Amino acid sequence: MAAPPVFPDLPLMTHGDGYNDHSTLQDHLALPYITRILMEEEDDVDDDHPALLHAQQPFAQILYSSSTLASALLADQGDTSSPSSAIFKFKGADEVGSLLLLADREYSKDTFSTAFLKGMEEANKFLPANNNLTSDGQGKVKEKSGRGRKDRHDELDIEVGRTSKLVEARACAVFDQMRGAVDNESGNNNKKGRKNKVHVVDLHTLLVHCARAVMDDRQSAGELLKEIKQHASPTGDAAQRLAYWFAEGLEARLAGTGRQVYGLLTAESTSALARMEAYQAFMSTCCFRRVAFLFANKAIFNVALGRSRLHIVDYGLRYGFQWQELLRWLAARDGGPPEVRITHIDIPQPGCHPEKQMKEMGDWLTDIARDLGVPFKYRAVMAQWQTVSIEDLDMEPGEALAVNDLFNFRTLMDESVVIASLNPRDAVLSNITKMEPDVFVQCIVNGSYGTFFLSRFREALFYHSAVFDMLDATMPRESRLRLALERDVFGWVALNAIAYEGEDRVERGETYKHWQVRNQRAGLRQLPLNRETVKMARDIVKNDYHKDFVIDEDHQWLLQGWKGRILYAHSTWVAERR
């Protein structure tokens, strides 16, 4: 049975002719053992003792067999696909260099000469062409000039033949050349290694270390931030862009300037037109919003079947794109469309004027409904979400009531901030339960941004690593629309989660399993997933989007993600007493 490879997770490398070079790989299995032998060398050993020389010969034969360390290192350095090259690169040139330095000891010169003589035939393949040494075939070496030399050790002459100082010099020169090749390879590999680690691994590690240092070692945090910023870039690859925005958040937290940074981002944010363009690009390259719209609209459409009136209560400020599609579906419904009423609830904010945008959105939806022949009414309510109750909705008899939240409830404060018996997050769920809707559609951001900074930082880092990787795979790096998304959406979310605490922190995501418990505690009952909706979502993602987007199901939640990381989740609920 063949011996296992040194690194079981590495495949056997092949030469250009397609065969697996097992012998080369197996020969290197002796290297760790030889290293240990060399490290155990004692100064008081008689290096020239015949018994010792005899015991050393098997190792010399191993070192100078048909696939020697020397031949591997002195071969064409450009052939990076050879087994020797693969093993040494993975093992690390520093370790091989240590082996060569250990071997290059005074006590090993004679042994090396002996091995050199017995492997002369192979060694000639990589010795310089102007070699002045010849062998008489008896294990003895002569100079071409015919000059002899004095014997150094009679015992060694008996064992392997006469050697010359020139042979020893040549052997040592070859060995030095081997060591130099390894040193060069070590330098090259170290440079490549540093580059890879900076872009792929080290930036993540540095960010976590910096986050830890921010809590109790400001000086170290500043040094780590400086190092991170040397490699981070808002226009680089996914890891560099991610590191750039996370470094901004860490720096703002360290300096206590979170509010100022947020104000600067808000002041310098892109125009409404640019945001619309970025949103359109995001919808076309990423399935998350499209699937969320499909999931919500199908649930609302189904509860309106057979009903003449539909009332939609929508939380959060958006552009209204979701309802354009639903209005088309309702217009094409058998028996004609119902009367549709949308109550849009948003939070008043100092310095902002959402009323204007809400009015514009209402006018736009009214025009679309008129063109489609759908009776339509729109009403905007400016209030804290948790304060809106059924009395504020002006319910009419016979209405089908649908409550809709797409990714907004994550910003509500929870029990970590509000110690009262009912925090805003639980209060809004309780009010929805009292509304007794025909369906409550909930779409959430699947991330646990808890109270403790370091755990929250790690979660945000893992979450946004998937997001930035997704953007890198689906949008060009030089795209200005991608820059706008990363700056005005994902960059701001990361900054807020990192730099803010208490009431100033807006991002308070929870996992879908936590939301499930919270909803049930509020008196809501989860509905099973609609199989037609799930099939439509799977078909859309499979046919129209990148292969690494994920659609899955768990405990009646429809899950969306990227490369196995679940980023969003969707579910439907009704009041338990319905």
Image: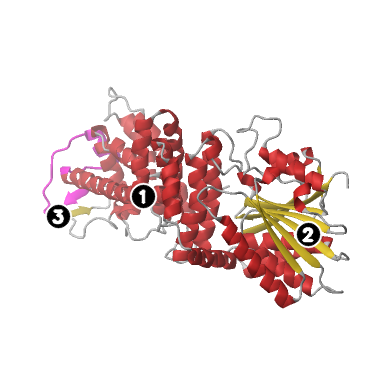
Tell me the crowding category of disc 3: few under 14, some 14 to 19, or many 20 or more residues within 10 angstroms, Cα based: few
Q: Which residues are magenta?
A: 141-165
The foreground one among 108 and 40 is 40
In the rendered structure, which disc, 2 or 3, sits on the residue that comes first in sequence? 3
Q: Amino acid at mark 1?
A: His
Report the colour scheme: secondary structure
Image mark for residue 231 = 1
Q: Position of residue 208 (x, y in %)?
A: 46, 39
Q: Whole-Å distance between the Cαs marked 1 and 2?
A: 52 Å
Q: Amino acid at mark 2?
A: His
**At numbered mark 3, what does the secondary structure look like: helix, strand or loop?**
loop
Q: Position of residue 65 (x, y in %)?
A: 38, 49
Tell me the crowding category of disc 1: few under 14, some 14 to 19, or many 20 or more residues within 10 angstroms, Cα based: some
Where is mark 3, residue-wise?
A: 144
Q: Position of residue 556 (x, y in %)?
A: 78, 50
Q: Residue at x 26, y 38 (%)?
A: 104
| Residue 298 at least partly seen | yes
Residue 45 picture quarter = top left
In the rendered structure, which disc, 1 or 2, sits on the residue that comes first in sequence? 1
Residue 503 picture quarter = top right
Q: Is residue 411 above or below residue 254?
A: below
Q: Whole-Å distance between the Cαs marked 2 and 3?
A: 104 Å
Where is mark 2, residue-wise?
A: 311
Residue 260 among those drawn in magenta? no
Q: Is residue 495 above or below residue 314?
A: above
